[in-house]
Amino acid sequence: MDTRVSGSGAPGAPMVVAEEVRDALVSGAAVVALESTIISHGLPSDSSARTARRIEAAVRAGGAVPATVAVLDGAVRIGLDDDALARVAEGPDVVKSSVRDLGPVLATGRTGATTVAATSYLAHRAGIALFATGGLGGVHRGARDTWDESADLAALAAVPVTVVCAGVKSILDTAATLERLESLSVPVVGYGTDVMPGFYVRDTGLPVPWRVDTPEEVAAVVAAREGLGLRQGLVVAQPVAGDAEMDPTLHERTLASGLEEAARRRVTGKDVTPFLLGWFHEHSGGASLATNVALVLANAELAGRVAAELARGRPGWPRSSAPDRERLTARGRS
């Protein structure tokens, strides 16, 4: 059973929270949000639904309840059943939905797969403060003078959600993205690393300003920021395991050919990232897909462990989410 929550937007655009997620939020148990663009645009459609359930299982292994986020039938969905998951994974014309797209997608009743930016925003609205993903969006290569950058950066600057990731997607300009995050006062911590991971590869050669080595240390940073009322997100960058890393030479060769093909086809804007990810999947002999799945599973488990640590009673947790939890309790079940 789901819980339909009013107050999440226009009267015709409610937030529907899965019962398990709602119960966890009300009781103060650990919850981790998951994006849905990885289901619709980041993985091959014939395996994406199965992989999505594996990602949810990894969150559970870490000690938290998974809440995959999407837009369906004019409502925000926080937690997806099998039917909803299949529709996002396999349905026609699923819209890659960032924050700017939420209004039109909801109003027209389209199916929307939420990006890092949209998932962070909607998770915060539901009272969820931990979010796991694969790689962050950022500044596009060659875009330092064109302002071509992902809405993920603006969301991180405005939404106090902790995002566990494998760094910035390696198809982007990592150095420029780190500069933008610094300007936006978004902290970046490396998990078990002193250098910024690069999604498919472990080491971009760029230092991270802070390092943490345990879920407890991440939780302490989150709790300290909560206590200060800081409104930016927190990026926790965990490198993919060494035995799952994509061969760097293959990575560079595939990236170069993908960028050349994208330019030839005049692929621009928000279409660049899914195009290049698809190019990697098609031209790396399965290497990029294996790496992508491995890093997302690892990030999901780590996010679950951090959420579980916070739920054990860290000071100040979860101060910013309390009003939404009270609203969930007051509405009861539909």
Image (spheres, rainbow, N blue to C red):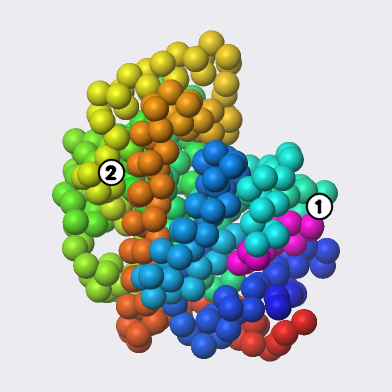
> Which residue bears the numbered disc 1?
109
What is the tally of numbered marks visible in this picture? Answer: 2
Residue 64 lies, in percent from the top left, at 43, 74
Q: Quadrant of the N terminus?
A: bottom right
Earlier along the polypeptide chain: callout 2 or callout 1?
1
Residue at 25% x, 73% y is 216
Q: Residue furthest top?
A: 264
Residue at 52% x, 41% y is 43
Q: Is residue 162 visible?
A: no
For label 1, the crowd category at 10 Å Cα-Cα, with few meaning under 14, some 14 to 19 and many 20 or more, is some
Is residue 82 within the magenta segment? no
Q: Secondary structure at mark 1?
A: loop
Residue at 43% x, 71% y is 60
Three-letter amino acid code at the position of disc 2 = Ala
Q: Is residue 27 above or below residue 137?
A: below
Q: Which residues are magenta?
A: 70-81
Where residue 162 sits, quadrant-wise, is bottom left
Badge number at residue 244: 2
Q: Is residue 244 visible?
A: yes
Judge from the rendering whether residue 229 lies leftward or rightward of residue 7; answer left or right.
Answer: left
Badge number at residue 30: none
Q: Is residue 50 above or below residue 301?
A: above
Three-letter amino acid code at the position of disc 1 = Gly
Residue 75 lies, in percent from the top left, at 75, 62
Residue 69 lies, in percent from the top left, at 60, 60
- Can you tell which of label 2 and label 1 is closer to the viewer? 2
Q: Secondary structure at mark 2?
A: helix
Residue 121 lies, in percent from the top left, at 56, 59
Q: Is residue 296 above or below residue 41?
A: below
Residue at 58% x, 16% y is 266
**152 vs 249, nearest the viewer:** 249
Judge from the rendering whether residue 94 lies leftward or rightward of residue 69; answer left or right.
Answer: right
